[in-house]
Amino acid sequence: MRPLNAPRPAPLPWPAGVDPDHVHQAVSRLRDNVIDRVDADGSIRGECHSRVLESALALTLMARIGAASPARDRVLAFLQARLDSPQEFDRVLATLAVSTAVHRAPDGDTDLIEKLTDAVLGSAPEFISARRRKMLYAVLSVLGCPLPSDVAPAPDEAAPTDPTHSWNVVQQAAVTLILANAAKVHNPATEAALTTLTATDPATTVWEGYVLMHLLTLHALAGVPGQEATVRGGLDSVLRHQRDDGGFPFIAEMHHWCTATAGIGLAATGAPPELLRRMAGTLVHHQGGAPLPSLSRGAALTGGWSMSPGVALNDVDCTSCALEFIQETAPVRFHGAVRSGVDALLAVQGEDGGFPTYVAGARGEPCMTAAAVNALAPHTDTVAARQRALDFLAESQLPDGGFEPGWSRSRLHTIFRARLAVGTADADDRRMAEVARRMEQSVRATQNADGGWGMQPGDASDAISTAYGLITLCCGDEARPVGRALSWLLDNQDADGAYSGPPDMVGPRPFPYYVSVLTQAPVLLAFGHVRSRVPGAAPLPQEVA
């Protein structure tokens, strides 16, 4: 994601109508805002905000087992405040959960549920739609909705064996058991599911801090005789993650992801070297993830990075961003860690050249492939692997110049990362030049009249998507759209130097979650790309850590 060092494109002229001093001030204020979030050990401790999905599951679980407490009253109040949410999915979940909690029969409008499910799945990658549909029906089932007949498990359904990561293994197990309990079906898949769920020790811990899966696990076990004590213990465990507003988050924390992504932006905008080295050091200290047994099926990525210290599951995205940041900051000091990370990425590349998110043998994804290329670019011994990955990106490009949805609601997220990846190709690679041209053309064509971009074409401009669009156009040769995007960012900065707006990151796909610094990081990175491409855009460097 960082600005390319070589080959560096020719400088862009200073955009007309943009005040350089205003840009310098905006960059410095945002950079200072992000620096203030760095702890003494170099971590940015990103706390995930409450979400309706987890909160609805928590309240319904409390009602299901008869748990009355101040915690129950607080999450009820959180959901009651969202009964009129502008987001239809949140509004329906809140209504169902509150109805169950106050002992009213929920509205089981099957047409509404089907419409809602289709709308949610429309923003998810096609390859996960079948399993995500099952998850949605499982959630709606525990909230009191009838189970469609075609979703019920077959009496002879076997346990899945396809290669997939541990989080999905647990999700599949919980969903399988919830649907089987609702349909009163018992089969080999339910036996395997019960074994998987009990392996997460739900009575005493929220496994890997994954609050959503923990709550689904407890709902699944609540339908199994003899699991009553486990469910009550699991409820006590998850209450430790209840937020001040009464709700519950998707995941407890995302320290590594926040540290790496914000760190790249800080490095690109001239933050103090000592601060950057401290941030790199904390990432290296936690390389490999938490020392927990893996539940993945297949060869999981190892030797890379997970999203936080308590998470064992390594992934291509966190590993790629951590590598980019460490290589930019202290490549010699942390040479061994860098080499391990490079090897970890290469080990999961698919035969088609694509990179999955988690395990070897899983489907390659354009966004993860672009991330890996950007991380591997400094290493000459990865030329062949990177060329295969670039070919995968070319084959994956859609007619509109974009790519399938990745881990973001913003169409521009994969585009900006793919554009940077394509920028690492040989200068005479005509195929990659055409891929790049189509991306830039698509981004220019979808820029809003106010100079920004929205999550999807036609949406109102937001800070994150505008940052992604600006980074993409910094790879091109037109100053005017760059200036328009810069003007939008200058006009929409908050008083404290930060940026506000809707979240783009999703987990599990396609459900958005909000961590404040993840709005700041892409904008900071965009300013860094402007700084590297437009002479005079760099503010004064920081003097002290």
Image: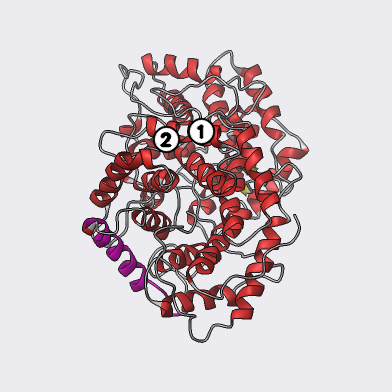
Tag 1–tag 2 contact (CB < 8 Å): yes
Q: Quadrant of the C terminus?
A: bottom right
**Where 264 sits versus 129, above or below?**
below
Name the residue rendered at 54%, 68% in the picture: 531
Q: Position of residue 425 (x, y in %)?
A: 32, 53
Residue extending farthest bottom: 17
Q: Position of residue 86 (x, y in %)?
A: 53, 61
Q: Mark 2: which amino acid?
A: Leu
Q: Is residue 517 magenta?
A: no
The residue where tag 1 is placed is 304
Residue placed under numbered mark 2 in the picture: 345
| Foreground pick, 139 / 306 | 306
Q: Between 172 and 11, which is closer to the camera in this rendering?
A: 11
On the question of residue 116 being in view, the answer is yes
Q: Is residue 99 left or right of residue 471?
A: right
Q: Which residues are magenta?
A: 431-449
Looking at the picture, tell me which residue is in the foreground, 72 or 447: 447
Is 384 on the left or on the right of 226, as rendered? left
As drawn, 172 above or below 499: above
Q: CA distance from mark 1 to mark 2?
A: 8 Å
Residue 433 highlighted magenta (yes or no): yes
Q: Residue at x 59, y 77 (%)?
A: 491
Q: Main secondary structure of the magenta part?
A: helix
Q: Secondary structure at mark 1?
A: loop
